[in-house]
Image (cartoon, rainbow, N blue to C red):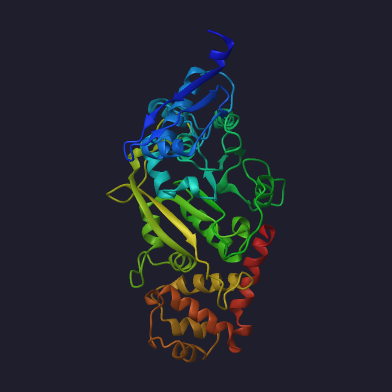
Amino acid sequence: MSLWSSRFVSLILRNFHCRRCGHQLLGQFRLYSSDGIVKRIAKSQPVQRLEKCMNVSAVTQTSLSTVARMQKGQNRSLSRYEHLEFDDVEEAAEKALACPAVRRFIVNPDLAKTVVNCLDPNLADSNAVIFECNPGPGTLTKALLNAGAQRVVALEGENNFLPELQSLENHLNGRLEVVHCDFFRLDPITTGVIRPPAMCTTKLFHDLGISEISWNDDVPVKAVGIFGQTHERNMLWKLVYALYERISIYRYGRIELVMFMSEKEYLKLIAQPGYIKNYRALSVLWQIACKIELLHKEPLSSFVISSGSGQLGVRKSKLPNDNLCLVRLTPHKNLFSGALTPDNAMTFLVMIKQCFAKRSAKLVNRLNDWCPGCGPEIIKQLNLPPHIIVGHMFPEDFKRLFEAMEHSKEFGHSWLYNEVLVYTHRTEFLI
């Protein structure tokens, strides 16, 4: 084979007739090079009609994939339209089980594709950066890229998964960036030197070139992953504190979370007033702050769980259906439209936590604890029942209560505000 024929694969279209209109269409000559560059020699208006009638673009992608298969094994950049092959499920599971930490992994390509469709069915048209949290063997990573994601940032905390991810990164012309970082260990509470996989949000976003934007702008980043089975609730508390104060990742805008979590924690997030068992402070805070959507339920058996010893981990669940829930948490644009601001958000957070310290107590008693004699007047002002129970109040009622307290002179010197100073001091390092 000549040098010319070994380097190029050509596709020639000649004298086609359109089945719709019957017009004869001029030929087109396209040249596909082994480095993915397409050289077009001629393309007339009739040929454009041909592409619409016969979907020549699909042929183009197939031809490029053919070139990729011919050149398999060579170090070259991959076209955006080339399909990335998934590892065998057993092979991916073996890699996941080698993880030295207890983690949940997606190794099934069908599950990965389901997650991608839930994340955004039109991913190729989205400008949001995708943070993939702890991708592991990269099954979901490839599904995101195959769906047309323009920019995926793989935040991987374990060293043993990095070489394969970085090898993939080197062939994708900037569409994939691999960072040795654990998303769930961002902004650790420490005064010492922070080393990977822990990292400060300011460094991560600076290195990625992501700037702060207005809270009312579109979602700049979508973080997708799986909460660890041992720290779900702690992560939800850490994230909700950061959200209300607009620190950590929320300093850069309305970051959207798409996370697998246990059904137990999901049911607490969406719990309604009156269901005292599950209706907690965390429920109120997330329901006020975000639109909460259940995107998908998947049996826990679909995931590979590493134990840190190379064996399958223990599947812990107290629910009979044993599911993980894929949940989208999108911050509301109007969260800070009233009296609530990032500056006084800590006071609001403490107020909610203090109210739910006794969920079955009367609200008037809690208010009188903060400011003796002020409870009945505030409740009357809000048009709430005089003896309403804390656990029977709707999330929006708590926000109205806070706004009324903010405008009340009596509550200005309450001990509640003094207690906020303790929480503020603990989170100053994140600002």
Residue 14 position in % (x across, y down): 42, 25
Looking at the image, which residue is at 45% across and 71% down?
A: 356
Residue 139: image quadrant is top left
Q: 288 or 206: nearer the eye?
A: 206
Count the marks: how many? 0
Looking at the image, which residue is at 54% across and 46% down?
A: 131
Which residue sits furthest front? 23
Q: In this view, does 328 lie to the left or right of 174?
A: left
**Is residue 97 shown to the viewer in this render?**
no
Relative to residue 5, is residue 181 depicted above or below?
Answer: below
Q: 199 or 175: nearer the eye?
A: 175
> Which quarter of the rendering shows the C terminus?
bottom right
Residue 181 position in % (x across, y down): 60, 42
Residue 86 position in % (x across, y down): 43, 29
Q: In this view, does 34 lie to the left or right of 60?
A: right
**Is residue 26 shown to the viewer in this render?**
yes
Q: 259 or 73: nearer the eye?
A: 73
Looking at the image, which residue is at 68% across and 62% down?
A: 428
Residue 430 position in % (x across, y down): 66, 58
Relative to residue 286, is residue 135 depicted above or below?
Answer: above
